[in-house]
Amino acid sequence: MTDLTNLLDLDPAQLVAYCGELGEKPFRAKQLQRWIHQFGASDFDAMSDLAKSLREKLKTRAFIASPAIISDHTSTDGTRKWLIDVGQGNAVETVFIPEENRGTLCISTQAGCAVNCRFCSTGKQGFNRNLSVAEIIGQLWMAEFALRQTKGIEPGPKGERQITNVVMMGMGEPLLNYEPTVTALKLMLDDNAYGLSRRRVTLSTSGVVPMIDKLGHDCPVALAVSLHASNDALRDGLVPLNKKYPLVELMAACKRYLEFAPRDFVTFEYCMLDGVNDTDQCARELIALVKHSAHPVNCKFNLIPFNPFPESGLTRSNNIRIKAFAQILVDAGIVTTIRKTRGDDIDAACGQLAGEVQDRTKVQERMKKMAEYQEKYGKDFGRIVEIS
Ligand code: SAH
Ligand code: SF4
């Protein structure tokens, strides 16, 4: 298999070049791409409008496959979570969140993460490796057609699209795996693949300033920035990358990005940590930062109730505090939302389960560990609770 090309690794231009090498015209690449990304085909024989000779050629040189699935769970609220095997004992998560008028897929870009934010269990696992294009786009490919199959919806452009929005908010820092991430984004946006609008694709970053600029030029999609702190001293301790790219630089980069962005605001994510970053003073500093500093940024805030894990030594702000904090931002005219719980019964919250998964037994061990934690710390352990 190692000499074969996984066609999920190729963006539209690369697929044209690949077909060219096989002596085929560019329109064949478009046909092939539609079979792969719009029909979910992995069998060349099913590609009926391709010449038999081309199909035979492809069979000897290429294949189409996303990584193996370790587990696949659907919550009572419809949230579906896949744990995906990315080899060498590593797993990443993909989560589908259905809502009334849309279906959002949360995808991962790295196994582990080197940024090592204090409140993030992915960071605590350290960095394992970058995911390939096939492993990133393969999450969308696999999920879209698995969801259709479950609902009995036909593949192809006529069948109802299940995934209407993508957020790169799973495991990993997408801007530290830049090229594969951008290639995957291009496929998401391409009309002969998923055809998603830029507004419906969101990349979340901890603030890799030069790469925010690069993304603005290469492939501007909606941007979410994990802020989590209202001043540098606090952010240095929570998001270590802040020491390299402090807030003044981050805000300037956000402002520059808005010149290219498909939306006229940046979403700031803010994880609510009890007694750490949730005081009235912090909220007031945030207002000063985004509205009255050297680089004011048109933004929305998304407050994320901390999803606790014991090694962090941190606890979640209580609901009254979160609402009071939100109110201060709202009163200053900043649109502010509080992230709600989804997938309660399957632990589909931020990166609690995936990590070093040597085999299925290890997954079961972790599941068991999770159940023990829940007994010890309450049923909300590892979840984001809904605040109404
Ligand atoms: N690395 C990127 C994207 C993945 S993390 C980033 O940091 O933006 C997606 C979001 O989940 C980030 O805002 C992150 O800060 C948040 N997050 C991580 N661990 C969390 C936890 N334990 N509880 C709540 N939110 C968490
Ligand atoms: Fe990495 Fe994002 Fe977790 Fe920070 S919050 S460690 S950047 S995945």
Image (cartoon, rainbow, N blue to C red):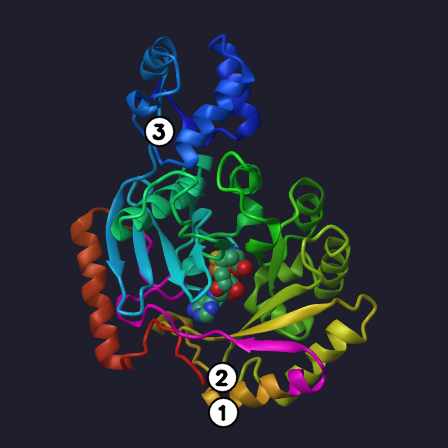
Give the CA separation, mark 3 to mark 2. 46 Å
Residue 47 visible in the current orientation: yes
Under mark 2, the amino acid is: Asp
Magenta span: predominant SS is: loop
Task: Please tell me in which quadrant of the rendered image residue 323 appears.
Answer: bottom right
User: Which residue matches tag 3?
Assistant: 64
User: Which residue matches tag 1?
Assistant: 320
The segment highlighted magenta reads 328-355
Quadrant of the drawing holding the N terminus: top left
Residue at the spot 28% in from the left edge and 53% down from the top edge? 151
Residue 67: where, in percent of width, then height?
32, 39
The numbered disc on residue 274 is: 2
Count up the numbered dots.
3
Task: Please tell me in which quadrant of the rendered image residue 96 appears.
Answer: bottom left
**Which one is earlier in the sequence, the residue at label 1 or at label 3?**
3
The 10 Å Cα crowd at callout 2, few under 14, some 14 to 19, many 20 or more, is some
Residue 202: where, in percent of width, then height?
56, 55
Whether pointer 3 and pointer 2 mark residues with C-beta atoms closer than 8 Å, the reply is no
Q: Disc 2 beta carbon < 8 A from ligand 1?
A: no
Under mark 3, the amino acid is: Ile
In the displayed structure image, the side of residue 333 where residue 275 appears, left or right: left
Give the CA separation, mark 1 to mark 3. 50 Å
The numbered disc on residue 71 is: none
What secondary structure is marked by label 1? helix
Q: Nearer the viewer, residue 222 or 118?
A: 222
